[in-house]
Amino acid sequence: MPEALSRALVLSAPPGRALRPLLLDAARAALAPFPVHGERWLEEDRVHEWLFAAPDDVPLATLRGAIAAAVDDPSLDLAVVADDIAVRRKLLLVADMESTVIEQEMLDELGDLIGKRDVIEDITERAMRGELDFEAALEERVAMLAGLDARVLDEVAGRITLMPGAETLVRTMKAHGAYCALVSGGFTQFTARVAARLGFDEHQANVLEVAGGRLTGRVSRPILGRAAKRDALARLTGKLGLAPSLTLAVGDGANDLDMLSAAGLGVAFRAKPKVRAAAAAMDNSTVVAHGDLTALLHLQGYSAAEFTR
């Protein structure tokens, strides 16, 4: 049976925790049926990878599941990714913003100003879990903001905090020739700030309508939702003349799933349970539940010593 090009198993503990020798031994035992070409620390004591070959008719998702069962520690992040040297380091990053590149959901923050944070948070959570239509949920939340002074957008933008590892992820990929795009179902009033702060090459998001210095409670058309995120990935792949295998997409919500499935490598980052399950079942995708955004660099084979901080 023909073997695939080398694949990489990346096993990582949460920041501040070391990988125990027993866990490394369990991973080695799980790989015993396959030729192992080498192993190394990507980050001393915390992130370890193995390069191995496996029959090319065995899906990556199947391998991932079998190795995860052998290691049997849900507090770790475990990924199996293709390790073809020509495609492992991606040349396009398309990233969701809210709860991915930044720690906030900005509509939830705006909800504070009208005393409806709990209501808006509940709708946001259900939409990100895929229980509500994204566009309808967006319109419902934005309608609650009608009449707010547009200057509050600057105030709320001051609450933005970056997800740990965001700066290092963008700086390192750009230092190695990648194009980085921020594609959000949120709003340009916030993506513009975050893109400039982190050095993204471009940003795309929805536009909050403003008239007479106040929010109208409407979103300009067209609304950037699930399909638009996938289309943005396709547009940029074509614009840059890249093979799809050289693309990386990351997000946390149900509206990111089409984009994740279309990328060379899709990463469900600290995602909702339904999104984690869907990504884990995809052959091209994986889940980062515990690490920070530098995990996306480890998945591409970067060691911590290669990071641009």
Image: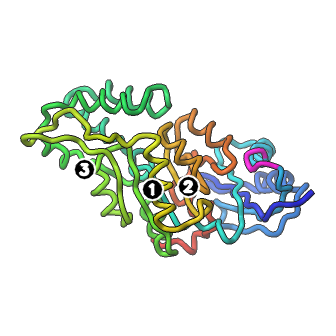
Is 178 situated left or right of 194 in this image?
A: right
- Identity of the residue drawn at 70% across and 62% down: 48
Q: Disc 1 versus disc 3: distance between alpha carbons?
A: 22 Å
From the image, tell me which residue sits under label 3.
189
Give the extent of the magenta segment: 58-62
In primary-sequence order, the first of circles 3 and 2 is: 2
* Callout 3 amino acid: Gln
Q: Is residue 74 above or below residue 249?
A: above
Q: In which quadrant will I find the C terminus?
A: bottom left
Disc on res. 15: 2
* Quarter of the rendering containing residue 296: bottom right
Q: Secondary structure at mark 2?
A: loop
Q: Nearer the viewer, mark 1 or mark 3?
A: 3
- Identity of the residue drawn at 80% across and 44% down: 66
Q: Is residue 59 magenta?
A: yes
From the image, tell me which residue sits under label 1.
164
Q: Secondary structure at mark 3?
A: helix
Query: Disc 1, disc 3: CB below 8 Å?
Result: no
Q: Nearer the viewer, mark 3 or mark 2?
A: 3
Query: Disc 1, disc 2: CB below 8 Å?
Result: yes
Residue 158 x/y as whole percent: 24, 50
Q: Disc 3 versus disc 2: distance between alpha carbons?
A: 32 Å
